[in-house]
Amino acid sequence: MLWLIALTCLSLLLYFLYRRLSRPEALQEPATAKAKSGKYNWESPTFEAVGPFFIKPWLQPGNHPHFAEDGSECMEVLFHTARRLGSCRVEVRELNAADQSPLLTVRPDTRTVNLVGVANQVQYVARLTGLKSDTAYGYKIFFGVEEVHSSTFSTRKSRGQEFRAIVFGDMGSGSPWQKQVAYQMSLPERSAADTASGKSSAHRKPRGADLLIGSGDIVYHHGRFNEYLSRFFPVYQAGKDSPETGAALLDKSMFISCVGNHDMAKYDPETLISFSDYPDLMAYFALFSLPLNGFNPEHDLGENEVSRKGAGTQQVGANLPPMTGDRQARQALIDAADGRYPRMANFSYDYGNAHFLFLDANTYMDWSEESLRDYVRKDLSKVPKGVWKIVVLHQPPFTSNRKHQREQNMRFLADIFEEQGVAVVFCGHAHSYERSRPIKFKVLEGAKALHRQVEGYVGGSITMDFDFDGKEKRQPNGVIYIVTGGGGAKLDSVDLMERPDLWQPWTVKLIGDRHSFSIVDFTRDTLTLRQIDLNGEEVDRFEIFNPNL
């Protein structure tokens, strides 16, 4: 009898010991990060790590730009910890299935992120494969026997399906406005596509949107890793949805974005921030997992081939995100990017009945170069008839914002956008909302770099459709350029709000006195855009017919 009691006690002791060792270790103090400061003397951000996470889970598409032949879908769940913590698994179940047992169990891949000036972290990447399209799933993350996170998501809409997207940019400043906009985006709203399908699900979509799209400048001021930790993830992974804190969005909705100037350490067109000033720059390449189907500046452009490890200062025409300063810090970023630098700066992605082309519009890119123009032309020409063609880039080629009017590099692609039937070009950069008339533009004497003025202006002939109103007349004769850069950074077009006499002739709507975001519905025939401000008020709405039918 005594041996049975001893065996029971020993079993209990071993069990509790196992539970203790397998439990994620909570961080007892807020983790702070400090980086070396040079002449750019902004305060180094601080952040708090909760439980086992440095960064709580967020959703990414991974390198899956196109629909699979068998109709299956993939999704990646990423998260960061301070160190490798026991045995980790992710369990996935279909929300509306009768059998609620896990249908997929994944052991995440791990890799160490060792950036100079940043607390060492481990990135976990759980690749969820073989999923159904347009289906709601629940997932749970375990370390050992402890469940540390649970959430839901919906997979990509299948080829040709209608859907809704939220588009916003210039967000990660950590401002009260950013948090208000995030909260407004999170509110429940049923999309027309979901209403028509008759589906109901425990997965709640923000404003009924299936996809979150960024128009660049994800964090301020320099795209630093520590800025993401303090000004991006906490706002869109808030523990409580409120106007004061933001909202939990990223673990439920996939976020994809183009790069802005601040994301690439370009404070302005002339100023490149050095890795000697801030060693955790260009964290975009280390944090996100987006398609790698764009051109490779190192190998695809011949004369512009530049060694990854030797990437230094490049001017206009290098077609490579430039790096300067501390070599160790630069190499650490390249290692953390794990092959995503520089490929991930340009890519395309298919979703439902739309094709999105994300382009790097920074000044080191020379989009007058024929090899780059050919890349854009080929990408758009492969899109099937009836599918919406949408371009997302940061610096708007047409804007009334006086601070950014001279950054007209992307005008070199305007003729391709027109000939290929691009419906809308979404931009950021200007911290406002702006809608252009349908535009047709051609660079005088052809798209050549010599036609770019030193200041950045690109002259040419412009034709505008003055009949299109987006209500009664919805067939645009040209491309509509939308600036949706009101995601949270300080407004910079307030003075233009009441001065239409200062607008450029192509500007038909400008909201410069408040922050806002775009809700875009893609049906077979029409695209409907609603601009919603940080208080939930609709400040613009228009529709266009699909020019690619």
Image (tube, rainbow, N blue to C red):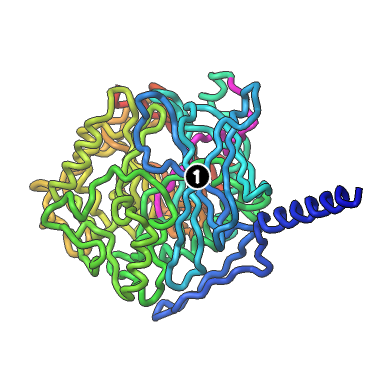
Residue 247 horizontal/vertical position (percent): 61, 49
Residue placed farthest to the bottom in the image? 39
Screen quadrant of the C terminus: top left
Residue placed farthest to the right in the image? 1
Residue 287 horizontal/vertical position (percent): 44, 55
In percent of the image, x 13 and y 47: which residue is there? 370
The quarter of the displayed image where residue 187 is located: top right
Bin the neighbour count of mark 1 within 10 Å (Cα to Cα): few under 14, some 14-19, many 20 and up. Answer: many
Camera-side residue of 441 and 201: 201
Regarding residue 529, the answer to whether it shows in the image is: no
Camera-side residue of 505 and 321: 321
**In terms of secondary structure, what is the magenta stretch mainly?**
loop
Left or right: where does residue 207 sit relative to residue 116? right
In percent of the image, x 64 and y 43: which residue is there? 150
Q: Which residue is the site of mark 1?
A: 126
Regarding residue 398, the answer to whether it shows in the image is: yes
Left or right: where does residue 17 sit relative to residue 536? right
Q: Secondary structure at mark 1?
A: strand
Residue 112 horizontal/vertical position (percent): 46, 61
- In the rendered structure, does residue 8 fall within the stretch colored magenta? no
In percent of the image, x 8 and y 47: which residue is there? 445
Q: Is residue 503 depicted above or below 374 in this figure?
A: below
The quarter of the displayed image where residue 366 is located: bottom left
In percent of the image, x 13 and y 55: which residue is there? 449
Q: Which residues are magenta?
A: 199-216
Q: Is residue 37 depicted above or below 192 in this figure?
A: below
The quarter of the displayed image where residue 177 is located: bottom right
- In the rendered structure, does residue 209 fall within the stretch colored magenta? yes
Identity, as a three-letter code, of the amino acid under mark 1: Ala
Camera-side residue of 511 and 277: 277
